Image: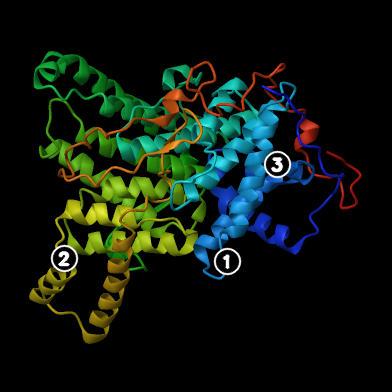
């Protein structure tokens, strides 16, 4: 393979001067970086890396691609051509760099992580190079894990978090065994302030363990019978771990306020659960999601039994309550998946309709595709055609004329979303298994038909991150990747610091 040099950097500059670049970078920082940084105390993606990108064209183009993509999703005035242009340029530069054994491995891994975010925002499978597995492989090349600090930690936790959200949806096992992350699971009661992110990482580990437990449930009745005791013991360990997490987290990760449905100003069917810090909201959503899943997969108690049903119902309502009242768009990525899981168990029509309204609100604000989830939930709830829905509503006590007109308008909007049934929602990327160029696109599985209390059946394809390692024959970036001579793990601090003043006395 012919080796070539990395793309030459642009002349040193201290700030953006193009109106277009300023717009797209602002959108990235304010709309995308906030959720990418939801588990990072130092906010690398929204506060530090944009400055580093001023003199790293590959990184800058990845940021601009995400910003342009978001604008195209939320505003029809903007086309996705600009987003594709920036994505193509960043991808081209990344593939070019991967052929250079003396490349900046941290820069390559960080760029791939951002391009991965771009791809999960896309409506359809991309025909070009895919970074879903590539980002993970480059993270492993840098030897980043739960013990890493700085940008390594930011990339690791974002990448692992996105994988877990996909595993929750597809009933996959987590490709990177959580016991190999290197995380310290210390459940000593927290007495220090500012440790919320550490505890968020711990609940993410617990969710990953639950994902693996759920995905490994035997389908053969005889195997299930033989392993019943072992599986029940593991379930008890996971439940105990979840309870201990909740008992020992800092006070700032518990709700600041709780209002019953009848007390809320919004008139919501769900309680108002108010948490203050973004990472606390994310952690709380993961915590309640853990308990919902555990209630569904107890090997010795059915979901319909009183104890498990109470556990399922209570935690589902907490998830819905947090999602219904949260004003922070930075938690939407986790809220979408948690809400979809929690909503499956809802039986009250008013609550079901409010959940769909929450999804629609998130779609309008973020542009993320939720039509697939709407359709899946309606099938799980047993909703019929729109005509039958109207007939059922008419058989119930009729609302006032003004309210009835408003409900019809909302229903029309929801019905329109059903046309997006073949589109995955934001956090579920169109999976492309990277073996040889070009990659083979795999369509998403059809919506599950099973009742809400039954775990999803395995899908026809597996977690694409299972091959996300350059030590494997079918590794990502075939025909482009060459091993790096020197693997960096952490950039010098000066590279991630903004200019000391507005006149550029500090250079990158």
Relative to 136, say whether 251 is above or below: below
Q: Which residue is painted at 29% across and 34% down in the image?
A: 171
Residue 200 appears in view: no
* Local SS, label 2: loop
Q: Which numbered dot is residue 435?
A: none
How many neighbours does mark 2 have within 10 angstroms: few (below 14), some (14-19), or many (20 or more)?
A: few
Cα–Cα gap, marks 3 and 1:
23 Å
The mark that comes first in sequence, 1 or 2, is 1
Q: Is residue 410 left or right of residue 96?
A: left
* Local SS, label 1: loop
* Residue 495 in which image quadrant: top right
- Asked whether 123 or 261 is in front, the reply is 123
Cα–Cα gap, marks 2 and 3:
48 Å
What residue did someone put label 1 on?
78
Q: Which numbered dot is residue 385?
A: 2
Residue 320 x %, y %: 32, 53
Q: Is residue 476 left or right of residue 60?
A: left
- Asked whether 103 or 195 is in front, the reply is 103
Q: Which residue is painted at 57% across and 61% down in the image?
A: 71
Quadrant in the picture for the C terminus: top right
What residue did someone put label 3 on?
58
Relative to 310, say whether 300 is above or below: above
């Amino acid at each position: 393979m012919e080796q070539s040099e990395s793309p030459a950097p642009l002349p040193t500059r201290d700030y953006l001067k193009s109106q277009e670049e300023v717009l797209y970078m602002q959108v990235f920082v304010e709309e995308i970086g906030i959720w990418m940084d939801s588990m990072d105390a130092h906010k690398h993606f929204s506060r530090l890396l944009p400055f580093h990108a001023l003199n790293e064209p590959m990184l800058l183009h990845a940021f601009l691609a995400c910003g342009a993509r978001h604008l195209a999703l939320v505003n029809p005035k903007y086309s996705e051509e600009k987003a594709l242009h920036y994505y193509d340029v960043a991808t081209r530069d990344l593939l070019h760099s991967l052929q250079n054994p003396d490349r900046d491995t941290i820069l390559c891994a960080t760029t791939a992580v951002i391009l991965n975010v771009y791809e999960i925002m896309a409506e359809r499978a991309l025909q070009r190079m895919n970074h879903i597995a590539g980002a993970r492989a480059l993270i492993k090349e840098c030897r980043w894990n739960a013990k890493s600090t700085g940008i390594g930690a930011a990339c690791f936790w974002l990448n692992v978090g996105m994988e877990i959200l996909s595993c929750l949806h597809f009933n996959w096992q987590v490709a990177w065994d959580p016991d190999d992350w290197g995380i310290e699971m210390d459940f000593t009661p927290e007495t220090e302030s500012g440790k919320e992110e550490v505890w968020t990482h711990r609940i993410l580990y617990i969710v990953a363990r639950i994902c693996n437990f759920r995905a490994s449930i035997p389908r053969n009745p005889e195997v299930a019978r033989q392993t019943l005791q072992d599986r029940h013991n593991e379930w008890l360990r996971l439940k105990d771990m979840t309870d201990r997490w909740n008992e020992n987290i800092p006070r700032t990760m518990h709700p600041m306020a709780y209002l019953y449905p009848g007390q809320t100003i919004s008139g919501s069917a769900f309680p108002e659960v108010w948490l203050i810090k973004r990472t606390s909201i994310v952690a709380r959503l993961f915590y309640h999601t853990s308990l919902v899943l555990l209630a569904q997969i107890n090997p010795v108690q059915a979901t319909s039994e009183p104890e498990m049903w109470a556990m399922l119902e209570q935690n589902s309502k907490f998830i819905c309550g947090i999602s219904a009242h949260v004003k922070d768009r930075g938690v939407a990525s986790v809220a979408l998946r948690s809400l979809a899981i929690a909503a499956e168990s809802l039986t009250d029509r008013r609550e079901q309709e409010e959940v769909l309204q929450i999804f629609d609100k998130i779609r309008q604000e973020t542009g993320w595709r939720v039509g697939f989830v709407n359709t899946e939930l309606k099938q799980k709830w047993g909703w019929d055609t729109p005509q039958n829905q109207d007939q059922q509503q008419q058989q119930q006590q009729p609302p006032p004329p003004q309210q009835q007109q408003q409900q019809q308008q909302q229903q029309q909007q929801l019905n329109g979303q059903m046309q997006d049934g073949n589109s995955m929602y934001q956090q579920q990327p169109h999976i492309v298994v990277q073996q040889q160029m070009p990659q083979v696109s795999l369509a998403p599985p059809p919506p599950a038909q099973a009742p809400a209390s039954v775990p999803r059946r395995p899908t026809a394809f597996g977690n694409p991150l299972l091959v996300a390692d350059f030590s494997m024959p079918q590794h990502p970036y075939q025909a482009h990747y060459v091993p790096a001579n020197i693997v960096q793990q952490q950039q010098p601090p000066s590279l991630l610091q903004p200019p000391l003043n507005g006149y550029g006395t500090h250079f990158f």
